[in-house]
């Protein structure tokens, strides 16, 4: 059964001349591909409907008849959509999916395309079954609920991107409710709306706990009448999250429904931030092995890319580091790691053959050399120094220097166009687009595990005066503490420096924690402050830089907080 995160979601939005899929036509369409919880490839285009756009549609969307007069035909655009829907594991997604799918299906039929049976997911129906009944479920309300900005409301790309972000949040909500497979997710959207059938004994038992829950991030544990642990979860708001299980409108996977009928006790532990709640949840599930948890009970192995430690290094896929090479990742799923490896193999001339290489002029190079995908160091066509320079270019890309490479490729593309080498210019343009997509999907600037050396500061839920620090060295979490925004951080230097140990032999648990943190950073990039640790002896400089940054930010806090005296939270307890 396919995992929630392994499916390829084709999030789609259309703007049309009316509401009938056969009488009216699409005037704009956008598709956003979501894989592993990350937004990737996008398709966006106006379409000439060969129909008059009514004034109220012009007013709503801002798309005029003049805009679509010279726009592409649907026969030029919809085949691109058909290609996406033909991808392995593709799922069509829209907010009010019935409307968008009927227009896309009608357009494809007119163009002579058939994409077969495509699973369809409606974020509107899914939200109605996963979110509180009092919450409105239209696109604007969902975006506001999750704090997602919509850049271009009632335009296809703006609405599709917002729906894609909402989908990711709903997938997280579904997973938290014990829905772990695509089949379960597709089934949940069609479930009858719940009618509050939990036994009165359960509701009476949990009522005191629900009344006492704080509006704070944290981790909760549900137990049965014998005190046995049933389920462990995390929450950005303990009160909102735990109460949602027992609302009459709540929808759950069948095994979570069975679990709720056994609940008699609820415990919780507050945490300073959502990230610390995520990490504590992982640790608790690993320790307690709750029977109704699916996520984190077994340590998942995330795919990596390995740059081998050889005279002529190779780039290959790996599932666990052994400390002998340089590793990049962890990536959310195998497909993304393979996509990046394929792109690098297309752009750079690294060898693909395994084993020790002994260059000799008598060796006959393989077909990759003739395809210009390898410099043939085996046949001495490429010196060791030239090969090392190529490896360094790959290493720089994987360390996050994507913009530098894009600028170089743009120069080559313009030069090829000026020399009328249009096919080469098109190939370069396609590479640039792939790299731009990749740069948006990097969870952090560098994908190197050994170079993930940072101090991360996140404002806490306690009060604006405090932040929670997370220190990572060589991809390992070595220090975590709540401090005052303007308290001196230099007193932390000895404790942190005592834990700065370089080691590349990471355990699966190390990588799972790293993946949790980088995913959180990717999704909340505007809510944290990071400072790199350049070397083991520079922690004092890094903390000094961070202190200046967060203390400056505290001076900009609203509601008169600028006059407060900032002291560590520990001194307030």
Image: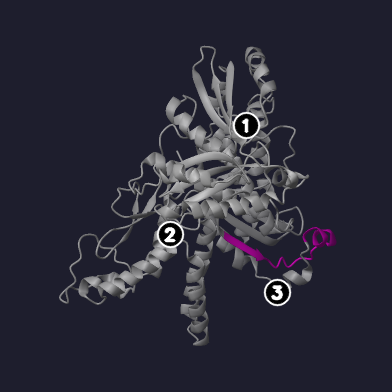
Q: Tell me the CA gap for discs 2 and 1.
A: 38 Å
Q: Does residue 507 appear to the left or right of 145 in the view shown?
A: left
Q: Answer above or below: position of 78 versus 138.
A: below
Task: Please identify the residue farthest to the bottom as the structure is shown.
Answer: 419
Is residue 50 rendered magenta in the image? yes
Q: Which residue is mark 3?
A: 70
Under circle 2, the secondary element is helix
Q: Does residue 415 appear to the left or right of 559 in the view shown?
A: left
Under circle 1, the secondary element is loop
Percent coordinates x, y for residue 563 in the rendering? 75, 45
Mark closer to the chain start, 1 or 3:
3
Q: Answer above or below: position of 199 versus 402.
A: above
Mark toward the viewer: 3 or 2: 2
Q: Nearer the viewer, residue 66 or 566?
A: 566
Q: Which residue is mark 2?
A: 340
Residue 135 quadrant: top right
């Amino acid at each position: 059964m396919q995992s929630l995160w392994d499916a390829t979601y084709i999030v789609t939005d259309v703007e049309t001349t009316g509401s009938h899929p056969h009488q009216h036509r699409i005037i704009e369409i956008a598709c956003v591909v979501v894989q592993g919880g990350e937004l990737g490839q996008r398709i966006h285009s106006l379409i000439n409907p060969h129909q008059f756009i009514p004034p109220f549609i012009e007013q709503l969307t801002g798309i005029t008849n003049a805009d679509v007069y010279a726009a592409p035909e649907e026969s030029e655009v919809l085949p691109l959509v058909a290609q996406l829907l033909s991808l392995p594991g593709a799922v069509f997604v829209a907010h009010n999916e019935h409307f968008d799918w009927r227009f896309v299906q009608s357009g494809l039929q007119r163009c002579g395309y058939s994409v077969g049976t495509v699973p369809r997911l409606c974020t509107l129906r899914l939200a109605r079954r996963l979110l509180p009944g009092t919450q409105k479920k239209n696109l604007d309300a969902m975006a506001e609920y999750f704090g997602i900005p919509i850049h271009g409301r009632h335009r296809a790309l703006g609405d599709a991107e917002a729906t894609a972000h909402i989908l990711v949040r709903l997938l997280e909500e579904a997973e938290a409710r014990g829905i772990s497979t695509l089949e379960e997710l597709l089934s949940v959207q069609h479930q009858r709306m719940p009618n509050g059938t939990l036994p009165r004994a359960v509701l009476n038992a949990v009522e005191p706990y629900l009344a006492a829950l704080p509006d704070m991030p944290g981790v909760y544990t549900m137990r049965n009448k014998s005190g046995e642990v049933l389920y462990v979860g995390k929450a950005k708001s303990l009160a909102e999250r735990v109460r949602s299980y027992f609302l009459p409108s709540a929808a759950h996977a069948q095994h979570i429904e069975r679990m709720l009928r056994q609940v008699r006790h609820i415990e919780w532990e507050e945490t300073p931030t959502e990230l610390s709640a995520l990490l504590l949840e992982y640790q608790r599930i690993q320790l307690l092995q709750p029977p109704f948890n699916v996520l984190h009970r077994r340590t998942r192995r995330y795919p990596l890319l390995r740059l081998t430690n050889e005279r002529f290094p190779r780039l290959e896929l790996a599932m666990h580091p052994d400390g002998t090479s340089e590793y990049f990742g962890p990536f959310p799923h195998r497909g993304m790691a393979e996509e990046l490896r394929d792109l690098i193999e297309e752009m750079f001339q690294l060898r693909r053959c395994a084993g020790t290489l002994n260059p000799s002029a008598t060796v006959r190079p393989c077909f990759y050399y003739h395809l210009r995908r390898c410099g043939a160091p085996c046949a001495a066509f490429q010196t060791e120094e030239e090969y090392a320079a190529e490896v360094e270019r790959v290493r720089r890309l994987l360390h996050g220097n994507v913009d530098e490479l894009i600028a170089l490729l743009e120069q080559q593309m313009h030069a090829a166009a000026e020399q009328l080498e249009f096919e080469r210019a098109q190939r370069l343009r396609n590479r640039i687009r792939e790299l731009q997509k990749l740069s948006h999907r990097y969870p952090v600037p560098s994908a190197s595990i050994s170079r993930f050396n940072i101090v991360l500061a996140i404002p806490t839920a306690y009060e604006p005066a405090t932040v929670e620090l997370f220190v990572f060295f060589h991809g390992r979490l070595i220090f975590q503490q709540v401090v005052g925004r303007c308290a001196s951080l230099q007193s932390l230097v000895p404790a942190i420096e005592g834990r700065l140990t370089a080691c590349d032999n990471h355990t699966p648990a190390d990588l799972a924690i790293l993946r949790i943190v980088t995913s959180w950073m990717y999704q909340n990039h505007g809510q944290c402050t990071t400072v790199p640790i350049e070397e083991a002896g520079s922690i004092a400089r890094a903390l000094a830089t961070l202190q200046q940054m967060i203390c400056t930010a505290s001076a900009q806090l609203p509601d008169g907080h600028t006059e407060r005296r900032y002291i560590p939270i520990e001194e307030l307890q």
